[in-house]
Structures are given as structure tokens and as C-alpha cells.
Image (cartoon, rainbow, N blue to C red):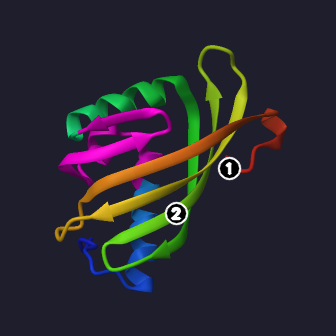
Amino acid sequence: MKKITPPFTAESAVAKVQAAEDAWNSKNPNKVAMAYAIDSQWRNRELFFTGRSAIAEFLKDKWDKERHYKLKKYLWSFTDYRISVRFEYEWQDSESGQWKRTHGNEHWEFDTEGLMQIRDMSANDINIEETDRKFK
């Protein structure tokens, strides 16, 4: 598969978003972390951290808690080196068993190699019934 690098076009921005969705749905923390610059800076809700190893650790913990995780990302806008997406994902809390749907936005900034150097994410969770799931 060809590496998707900036500057982005409408076609390459859509492809970058789809590649991110596919990677995250693999639920493989090390695979996902490789899409980020070594010193990538993250804000994930109230958490701030830097670097691939921190990203992989965060994702491992995330997917240990969020069982049956299924994500859909949608391109919102893009410029030469930045992409904004909105997303939804569904998951079941490993402790309570409660199903949830998370709605949010991400803003991404890439280096010239196509690695994400900044990820800024905001999201809200809502409780849902298993029968109300959109993504299976």
C-alpha cells in the first residue's frame, strides 16, 4: 500500500482517514502507534502525553476497557498538512457491561513523511442498549 503523505488532496485526505479507521479497528496498539511521529503530542479528552510508547500504552489500556470496540471516522475538513475528523465508536465497558457510543472530533497535524505529529481529541460518551448499536 502506498504511504499517504501531505500535502493532502480531497482524495488523499479521505484515504488517510480510512487508513486511520482501519488501523484503529484492528485494536493493535503497536500497529496504530506506528502511524504517529516518535514524539507525537496527544490530547485525548483530559489526558496529555507524548511519544509512540505512551500512545501504545494508552491504546492497550483503552482496548482492555472498551470491549467490542468498533469505530467509524468521517472527514470533516483538511488543509495541506492538517485533517479534522468527526467520529463515532461503540464499545462495551469491561467492568459494568454497559454499552456506550462515543461521539467526538479530532484534529490532526502531519509531518512531511505522513506521520501524525499532533492529535487533539474531544469526545462524549452516551449509554446505549446493545440493541441500539449501529456498528457490529
Residue count near mark 2 (Cα–Cα under 10 Å), binned few <14, some 14–19, many ≥20: some
- Residue 89 lies, in percent from the top left, at 61, 46
Residue at label 2?
Answer: 85
Decide: is 18 above or below 100. Answer: below
Q: Identity of the amino acid at label 1? A: Phe
The magenta span reads 23-50
Residue at label 1?
Answer: 135
Q: Earlier in the sequence, mark 1 or mark 2?
A: 2
- Residue 53 lies, in percent from the top left, at 21, 34
Residue 120 is labelled as none
Q: Is residue 46 left or right of residue 135?
A: left
Q: Is residue 22 magenta?
A: no
Decide: is 21 above or below 2. Answer: above
- Residue 72 lies, in percent from the top left, at 58, 56
* Most foreground residue, 103 or 134: 103
Residue drawn 40% across the image and 42% down it: 43
Decide: is 81 above or below 40. Answer: below
* Most foreground residue, 80 or 73: 80
Residue count near mark 1 (Cα–Cα under 10 Å), binned few <14, some 14–19, many ≥20: some
- Residue 29 lies, in percent from the top left, at 33, 38
Q: Identity of the amino acid at label 2? A: Val
- How far, Cα to Cα, is label 1 from label 2? 18 Å
Determine the secondary structure under disc 2: strand
- Within the image, what quadrant is residue 114 found in? bottom left
Residue drawn 65% across the image and 29% down it: 92
Residue drawn 51% across the image and 74% down it: 77
Q: Is residue 75 left or right of residue 110?
A: right
Q: Is residue 104 left or right of residue 28?
A: right
Foreground label between 1 and 2: 2
Residue drawn 65% across the image and 40% down it: 124
* Most foreground residue, 42 or 90: 42
